[in-house]
Image (spheres, rainbow, N blue to C red):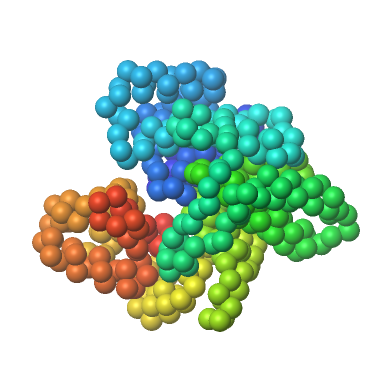
Amino acid sequence: MNNDPFEEYIKQSEPSAQDKGYAWHTAIGLQAVDGLKPSQYLIETAIKNIEGDISIDEAQTLLDSYYEENPKHSSSDRTEEADKVSVRIAKILSEKAFSFTPNEYISIHRKLFTGIYSHAGKIRDYNITKKEWVLDGATVLYGSASELDATLDYDFQQEKNFSYKNLSMDEIIHHLAVFISRLWQIHIFGEGNTRTTAVFFIKYLRMLGFDATNDIFAKNAWYFRNAMVRANYNDLKNGIHETTEYLELFLRNLLLDEKHELHNREMHISGKLVQSANSNISKCQNGTLKFTIDELSIIKILLSDSKVTQKKIAELTGLSERTVKRKTVEMQQKGFIIRENGKRNGKWIVLIDAEEI
């Protein structure tokens, strides 16, 4: 998120405002795993809560009333979902209560998605596949529908029986990466697995004594999901094996406040995006990435609206629509952006971190 409205609360405010600022910052940031963007109304409501003008329950009531009175805002861009799930995540992260059980995990899904998904809080009874950009269109092998209950119980029992005593921090982080990636791989819900898993994991980390209140989840939600994808994918004939290395970098930044650069393109199984980026992107003297002016303009537009059309980009930049089409193809080849989900329901994903622009 650019011009982050919550940064001042996280870094400079009193503890209570910091905690609420972190909860909202994370809640809104996590919507990015499904390409969702909250409304300005939600952000304004969140700030009122952070500053103590309204409670989190009042914020939720205001939001519900807003969409009842303004049904035109409940459009196909899923803004209502982003707003309602954000306030629910913020509420859960603000609560101290937590139990490390499968029921708690399922309950979080129910709390987040009631009224949004018909299957909220229900374990799926069908098998699923998902085409993953990071796997070049391949899918992770998710849990079998007939075994979900048993698999979930097994993973929780294994973790309950595990002892962290006398482990180094490297060993702890590796184990946590394995645990959370396996929990996510089960994918017990039809939709909303990543957001549910992230919220549950943050609560579990707190139970283990970690603070986990920086902005890593908020700014790198899509990286977090892709890292779990890579932790659960094998294609041994092509030399690709499951690895938690990317998830461990994420956790080191989250738990140890390290500063590893987290780039989605580095996880792509082809390796072509990294090679392309290294060969096509040169550095200016000030260390920033050297784009053409037109490329930089397009990237900034895509960051503000992931579903913008090429026609609209042309209008905003003054370029011809043909030129925009050519440049977006070139930018995909360079590893700057990708197009996901096709022409009609597609969205743009920027692979360049905001700090590099």
Q: Is 270 above or below relative to 312?
A: below
Q: Is 310 above or below relative to 97?
A: below
Q: Which residue does the image show at 18% across and 63% down from the upper left? A: 324
Nearer to the camera, 262 or 265: 265
> Residue 343 appears at what percent x and percent y?
25, 56
> Residue 221 appears at what percent x and percent y?
51, 51
> Residue 152 appears at what percent x and percent y?
69, 47
Q: Is residue 53 visible?
A: no
- Position of the C terminus, as image quadrant, is bottom left
In the image, 254: left or right of 134?
Answer: right
Residue 140 in which image quadrant:
bottom right
In the image, 324: left or right of 65?
Answer: left
Residue 250 in which image quadrant:
bottom right
In the image, 108: left or right of 209?
Answer: left
In the image, 156: left or right of 21?
Answer: right
Q: Which residue does the image show at 71% across and 29% down from the upper left? A: 97
